[in-house]
Image (cartoon, rainbow, N blue to C red):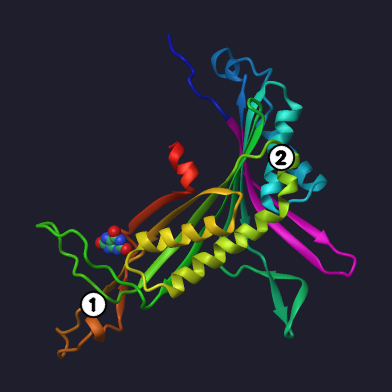
Amino acid sequence: MATLSQARYGKDNVRLFKVHRHDDGTQDVTEMTVCTMLEGDIAASWTKADNANIVATDTQKQTAYVMAKLHPVNPPELFGSILAQHYIDEYAWIDAAHVSIVVHKWTRMPVDGKPHPHSFLRDGDEKRTVEVTASRRPGKISVRSGITDLLVLKSTGSQFWGYHKDEYTRLPETRDRILSTEVEAGWQWDDFRDLEAVKKRVEAFDRAWNDARTITLETFAKEDSPSVQNTMYLMAEQILAVAPGVRAVEYSLPNKHYFEIDLSWFKGLKNTGKDAEVYAPQSDPNGLIKCTVTRPSAAAKI
Ligand SMILES: O=c1[nH]c(=O)c2[nH]c(=O)[nH]c2[nH]1
């Protein structure tokens, strides 16, 4: 005998784009990629070839379009909650609806020194992300917001020394190195009782995203970093301090190495230490440093 111990299904990579037309002729645009996944009394589709409780993945795609037409798509935390809660309200046998949203960047184009009313440019790969789960029992909405693919580099103001050394160690200590990473940050909100509770806090989502982004960039730039570990902890601590509805902050930061190149073989050229100017960027391998930082009360429960 076999047991189906877990099952969920849905539509991934649903791309949608919404134009917001204002009375003064200016337009805003939002482009997102959505994934919806459903759980509940759906096992018979797997075990008995009975699809009666299957809300087709095509239906889920159509639903994302319809919800985007009927409701605001911003902030994405609200849209994700509306979409997830729809499945709980509409289908009695669905117990959990998971919605992931990736918002792609369209920045208003400056033309003739002014923001253009309806032209946009992609100025970077950075994305805003949201993961929402609406659950039936207990009824709640869980929201995690985040930033991904935010590529940053500083050419000084980073050190790494004092680490454990043994017979396997080759890395020299440094008081001045290049530091580069692609920021992946996430912050988990306290659970919301229902959609109304999400709507009541709607301003908090954009504020937290702006604060998290600013804190990430400013801490990265300003701190004379002793390690990626310490820098990410300082970032997370500050986000918790400014976003009261957030219970945990996570960072996942690759350490994208830029190696010094010894050029002394060529006419004694000095290109290491304080003379380093030409570096070799490394595509792999990279360090990968992660952490989750919680408030004292939440940490105590773990
Ligand atoms: O900030 C760093 N943390 C490490 O753990 C580490 N390890 C390493 O080789 N370089 C670095 N840099």
Q: Residue at x 54, y 51 (%)?
A: 187
Q: Residue at x 75, y 29 (%)?
A: 89
Mark 2 or 1: in front is 2
Quadrant in which the C terminus is drawn: top left
Judge left or right: residue 122 versus residue 22.
left
Asked if disc 2 and disc 1 are in contact, CB closer than 8 Å, the reply is no
Where in the figure is residue 9, as x and y percent of width and height? 58, 30
Q: Which residue is mark 1?
A: 261
Quadrant position of residue 283: bottom left
Q: Which residue is mark 2?
A: 83
Judge left or right: residue 61 versus residue 167.
right
Visible residue check, residue 74 = no
- Mark 1: which secondary structure? loop
* Magenta stretch in the rendered image: 9-37
Query: In what quadrant does ligand 1 lie?
Result: bottom left
Q: Nearer the viewer, residue 273 or 232?
A: 232
Magenta-colored segment: predominant secondary structure: strand
